[in-house]
């Protein structure tokens, strides 16, 4: 059970009156997690969190790649950004060590912001700082996972495009014959002997790749995880979905 005295270790709770801390302590969730355990997934309902012990990492998936955005130590808090912006969680949270957290629901968070000017000011300053960090991280991220270079009427290009779209790979298509695309195409590919070519995020170029070669280069799963399965369903159309259900 969380006590008002334990909340004093978190600056935003320390700014509250004793009565306000007692209310938070009585109503908040006392959450214990093991190392490696997920606390929040991207898209989950939002709460305000504070870390009493342990260490937690914030993870963000951009263009299919999950990266560590930051870590939190005891006394730090998080979750105020989606709460104050009225959105769902847009970061995942995972414990790096056995950790203990305070989980405050939306109603109590709102009361904390509106009833205590000092706590509200701390949270507003944190919000501004973290939104700036999120903007910088988003601007630095490379969203495109593959760039198709080839004629817009080339059937092979359309096949690659359909494959990438079905696998939710973010891609861009550049046509060497289009003056508007020419400047964005690497010089070595502007007059290539053969198309389509696919440029990967690490600048590798695949020329007329097979779909399997493309999948393996994008680190998509191409091999079964197990040697034995009870049932195998081939195809994701209406019949395949019906059998899966």
Image (cartoon, rainbow, N blue to C red):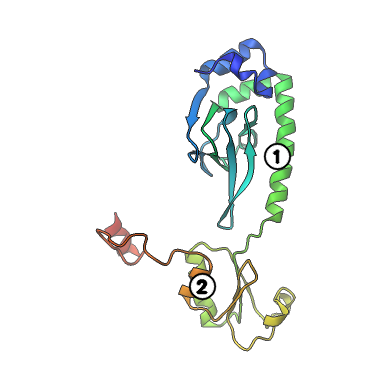
**186 above or below 142?**
below
- Give the image location of residue 244, x and y in percent: 30, 57
Q: Residue furthest left?
A: 230
From the viewer's perspective, tell me whether residue 88 is left or right of residue 34.
Answer: right
Q: Residue furthest bottom?
A: 193
Q: Residue furthest top?
A: 19
**56 above or below 150?**
above
At 50% from the left and 24% from the top, the residue drawn is 29
At 49% from the left and 69% from the top, the residue drawn is 216
**Count of numbered marks:** 2
Q: How many residues crowd around disc 2 within 10 Å: few (fewer than 14), some, or many (20 or more)?
A: many
- Give the image location of residue 166, x and y in percent: 47, 65
- Asked if marks 2 and 1 touch (Cβ < 8 Å), the reply is no
- Give the image location of residue 121, x and y in percent: 74, 26
From the viewer's perspective, tell me whether residue 141 is left or right of residue 35.
Answer: right
Q: Secondary structure at mark 2?
A: helix
Relative depth, front residue between 175 and 132: 132
Mark in front: 2 vs 1? 2
Q: How many residues crowd around disc 1 within 10 Å: few (fewer than 14), some, or many (20 or more)?
A: some
From the viewer's perspective, tell me whether residue 229 is left or right of residue 138.
Answer: left
Image quadrant of residue 13?
Answer: top right
Circle 1 is placed at which residue position?
Answer: 130
* N-term-proximal mark, 2 vs 1: 1
**138 above or below 7?**
below
Q: Secondary structure at mark 1?
A: helix
**159 above or below 116?**
below
Circle 2 is placed at which residue position?
Answer: 214
């Amino acid at each position: 059970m969380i006590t008002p005295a334990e909340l004093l270790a978190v600056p935003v709770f320390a700014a509250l009156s004793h009565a306000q801390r007692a209310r938070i302590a009585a109503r908040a969730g006392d959450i214990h997690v093991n190392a490696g355990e997920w606390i929040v997934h991207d898209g989950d309902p939002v709460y305000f969190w504070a870390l009493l012990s342990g260490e937690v990492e914030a993870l963000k998936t951009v263009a299919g790649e999950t990266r560590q955005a930051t870590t939190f130590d005891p006394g730090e808090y998080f979750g105020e950004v989606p709460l104050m912006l009225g959105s769902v969680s847009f970061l995942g949270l995972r414990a790096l060590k056995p950790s203990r957290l305070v989980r405050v629901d939306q109603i109590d968070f709102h009361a904390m912001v509106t009833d205590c000017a000092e706590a509200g000011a701390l949270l507003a300053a944190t919000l501004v700082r973290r939104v700036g960090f999120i903007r910088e991280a988003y601007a630095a991220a490379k969203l495109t996972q593959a760039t198709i270079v080839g004629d817009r009427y080339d059937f092979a290009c359309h096949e690659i495009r359909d494959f990438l779209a079905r696998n939710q790979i973010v891609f861009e298509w550049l046509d060497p014959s289009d003056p508007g695309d020419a400047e964005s195409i690497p010089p070595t590919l502007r007059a290539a002997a053969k198309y389509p070519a696919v440029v990967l995020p690490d600048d590798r170029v695949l020329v007329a790749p097979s779909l399997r070669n493309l999948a393996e280069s994008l680190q998509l799963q191409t091999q079964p995880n197990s040697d034995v399965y009870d049932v195998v369903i081939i195809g994701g159309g209406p019949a395949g979905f019906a059998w899966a259900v």
